[in-house]
Image (cartoon, rainbow, N blue to C red):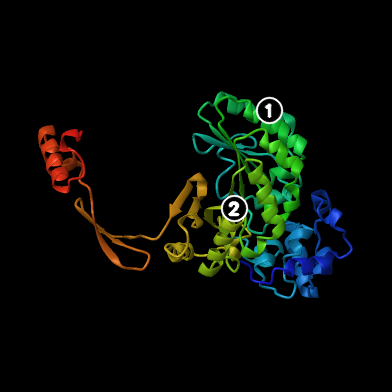
Amino acid sequence: MEDEPPSTAATNRRRLFGNIPDSTWNDWKWHFRNRITTVEQLNEFIPLSTEEQAQLRWVTMRYPLSITPHYLSLIDPCDPDDPIRKQAVPSILELSMGKMGIEDPLAEKEDSAVPGLVHRYSDRALMVLTDICPMLCRHCTRKREWRHGGWVRTDDEIEAMLDYLRRHKEVRDVILSGGDPLTLSTQHLESIIVRVRAIEHVEIIRIGTRFPVVLPQRIDDELCNMLSKHGPIWLNTHFNHPRELTPESARAIDRLLRAGVPVNNQSVLLRGVNDSLETQLRLCQGLLKIKARPYYLFQCDEVQGTEHLRTPVEVGIRIMEGMRGHTSGFAIPNFVVDLSHGGGKVPLQPNYIVSQTEEELVLKNYQGRKFRYRNPNNRKATRQMPVESLLSAAKKQYQTKGAVDADRVVV
């Protein structure tokens, strides 16, 4: 499941944070307070040349840096191409390729019914509660918000969103997002969940969070006990690489499930991180081992400052083709492009239809072999035989087989 021996993260923890006792290491608030947020701090843990430090200072003036101690302990400091490092440590390519892409590729501002509430699909809406995250992932869709400092929605802003939801009875599914909504205190988060749950036509609440990956200690008993009281709540998280599937993350997922909170995973396809069939297989099979369902594999959004991490779309299609037939079906996520300008999600997959007529399809299977498949014809299916003829045929069939008393056959 991992590139390295299972003890590597523990070894890194001892090397980097050997003076931190378990009681402190298991406190999510300590991790949050001790995030690495400057190039100087980063250099204490990952050796950087003078040139690299100068470059990263330029990058972080536009796109800040934040890494939790937990996630830092997963990085191989000796490998500049480490897939964990690529997600967390800034790159000069964020600026040198920065003119490519769009600030708000999904046109969330255009679809914001009131500030903070995105209503694109008729039956669901997304509440952006904060722009604060424990880690600033270098491929973030909302990278544009990083320059605005840390903010949390005021109660008046929350109430405006709730008022909109109350008036729009078609909304049955509400997603709490950010930033990361789990940066809010459990008490504050519950106060929002209670008010959403009080809206009669809202059936499902979802939480989008990367805490189980980058700071799994946040998924504690207090949080899980709170969530268990307000279901159905679903949680979507964001593992991108098998090495992120740590024992701490596995325990976090287990706690959520025991609290009645199902967990889906939404990966992003990233160059040099998870853009190979082998890595995706190990990731998705590893997710099933910790009881998280692979849900989406997103094509990396066309965000400014992320072009160096984006792959051609055909890479994702080839990965889907390679997974089909070689692992459990529910280990295969949906490969999705979230269209720019608010076009919504479009699933992509290999084309298994070679040819098609009203009578027959020629299909290609996962091995590349071709098969003929009879296509049911709706017009012919409606031309039913008289009931008497069906009954007579059924009696003859069962008399021949001697299976049952033909007089008891009911058509």
Camera-side residue of 151 and 55: 151
Residue 90: image x %, image y %?
Answer: 71, 64
Along the line of sight, the residue nearer the viewer: 45 or 211 = 211
Instruction: Pinpoint residue 156: horizontal percent, then vertical percent.
Output: 72, 28
Rendering quarter of residue 284: bottom right
For label 1, the crowd category at 10 Å Cα-Cα, with few meaning under 14, some 14 to 19 and many 20 or more, is: some
Relative to 49, is 155 above or below? Answer: above
Task: Indicate the quadrant containing the C terminus: top left, top right, bottom left or bottom right.
Answer: top left
Locate residue 357: give its quadrant: bottom left
At a point 21% along the width and 55% down the height, the residue shown is 360
Which label sits on residue 159? 1
Q: Read off the residue under disc 2.
A: 291
Q: Looking at the image, is mark 1 or mark 2 earlier in the sequence?
A: 1
Q: Residue at x 68, y 52 (%)?
A: 212
Residue type, label 2? Lys
Q: Quadrant of residue 191?
A: top right
Give the quadrant of the N terminus: bottom right
